[in-house]
């Protein structure tokens, strides 16, 4: 017996309707965001690293920079300004080297300091010439000069940006989101102005002073790779073992011409 075609279509539609599964009820989920567990050093066992940066060979002659394009800058330097990319005193002490813990702190998360780091534009220079800062720490940029400057960090890992600052402008506030050794900073208006920022994920870094000395304090005991960066002389590293409550020496020498 042949079924009427209309009746057959009705049967098929009913069959398909019966095969449809019931809509799945959304499952309630609870997202839990756990706060990072920060590492805190035991002050009873913490040690430190102290050292000196030396330059051997003929002491470099300070290079005179032409700043005549801006009379205000000429006045600030009493007519003369010298390049700061290689600062060596009469004893061979090397300034402006960035020293930091390169390896040995893996797995430790450190709290971002609430203190700020300042980079000033003063006397038509960036001050300081080399500085360190932690990821997420607040960087304050100021302009103490009566002329307009430009702050331009040429980052490769972090975001590059630049901003002009006129006399009396409010300070800028910026943060870096990733470690980067180093971030060059320049002024697009005065091409002799340069600075360098070392961005780390830990608080263990220092910049060698005019007498070549540096010190990294409150360091947990352990074995570390200590890295050194200098804008003209390159990088070095050294393996250091820090014992509890001890000051471990670490000296570096760069050979000049």
Image: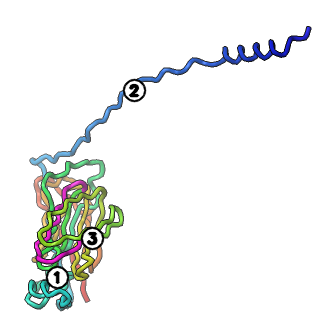
Residue 152 is labelled as 3
The answer to which of 229 and 121 lies nearer the viewer is 121
Q: Is residue 191 left or right of residue 243?
A: right
Q: Is residue 150 magenta?
A: yes
Residue 211 placed where, x, y %? 10, 77
- Binning the other alpha carbons within 10 Å of mark 2 as few (below 14), some (14 to 19) or many (20 upward) gives few
Residue at left offset 28%, top offset 68%: 162
Q: Is residue 60 visible?
A: no
Calculate the distance from the C-alpha at mark 3 to the C-alpha at mark 2.
45 Å
Residue 15 placed where, x, y %? 72, 15
Which quadrant would the C terminus be assigned to in this image? bottom left
Residue at left offset 18%, top offset 90%: 68
Of the two numbered discs 2 and 1 on the same chain, state the one appearing first in sequence: 2
Residue 87 is labelled as 1
Region of the chain picked out in magenta, as a range: 135-152
Of the two numbered discs 1 and 3 on the same chain, state the one appearing first in sequence: 1
Q: Quadrant of residue 23?
A: top right
- Binning the other alpha carbons within 10 Å of mark 1 as few (below 14), some (14 to 19) or many (20 upward) gives many
Residue 181 placed where, x, y %? 29, 66
Q: Is residue 107 left or right of residue 137?
A: right
Q: Quadrant of residue 173?
A: bottom left
The correct choice, above or below, for 14 with respect to 138 in the image is above
Q: Is residue 138 left or right of residue 31?
A: left
Residue that label 2 marks: 29
The correct choice, above or below, for 124 with respect to 5 in the image is below
Of the two numbered discs 3 and 2 on the same chain, state the one appearing first in sequence: 2
- Binning the other alpha carbons within 10 Å of mark 3 as few (below 14), some (14 to 19) or many (20 upward) gives some
Calculate the distance from the C-alpha at mark 2 to the C-alpha at mark 1.
60 Å
Q: Is residue 14 magenta?
A: no
């Amino acid at each position: 017996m042949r079924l009427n075609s209309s009746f057959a279509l009705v049967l098929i539609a009913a069959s398909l309707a019966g095969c449809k599964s019931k809509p799945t009820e959304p499952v309630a989920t609870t997202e839990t965001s756990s706060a990072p567990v920060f590492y805190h050093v035991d002050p009873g066992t913490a040690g430190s690293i102290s050292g000196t940066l030396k330059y051997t060979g003929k002491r470099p002659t300070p290079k005179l920079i032409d700043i005549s394009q801006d009379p205000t800058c000429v006045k600030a330097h009493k007519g003369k300004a010298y390049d700061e990319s290689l600062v060596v005193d009469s004893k061979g002490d090397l300034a402006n080297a960035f020293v930091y813990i390169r390896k040995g702190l893996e797995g430790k998360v450190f709290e971002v300091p609430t203190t700020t780091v300042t980079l000033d534009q003063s006397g038509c220079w960036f001050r300081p010439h080399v500085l360190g800062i932690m990821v997420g720490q607040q960087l304050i940029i100021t302009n103490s000069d009566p002329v307009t400057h430009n702050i331009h960090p040429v980052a490769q890992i972090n975001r590059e940006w630049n901003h002009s600052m006129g006399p009396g402008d409010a300070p800028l506030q910026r943060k870096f989101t990733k470690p980067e050794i180093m971030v060059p900073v320049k002024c697009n208006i005065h091409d002799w102005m340069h600075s360098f920022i070392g961005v780390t994920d830990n608080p263990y870094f220092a910049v060698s002073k005019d007498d070549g000395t540096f010190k990294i304090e409150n360091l947990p005991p352990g074995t570390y790779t200590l890295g050194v960066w200098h804008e003209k002389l390159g990088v070095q590293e050294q393996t250091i073992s820090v014992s509890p409550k001890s000051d471990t020496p670490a000296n570096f020498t760069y050979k000049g011409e």
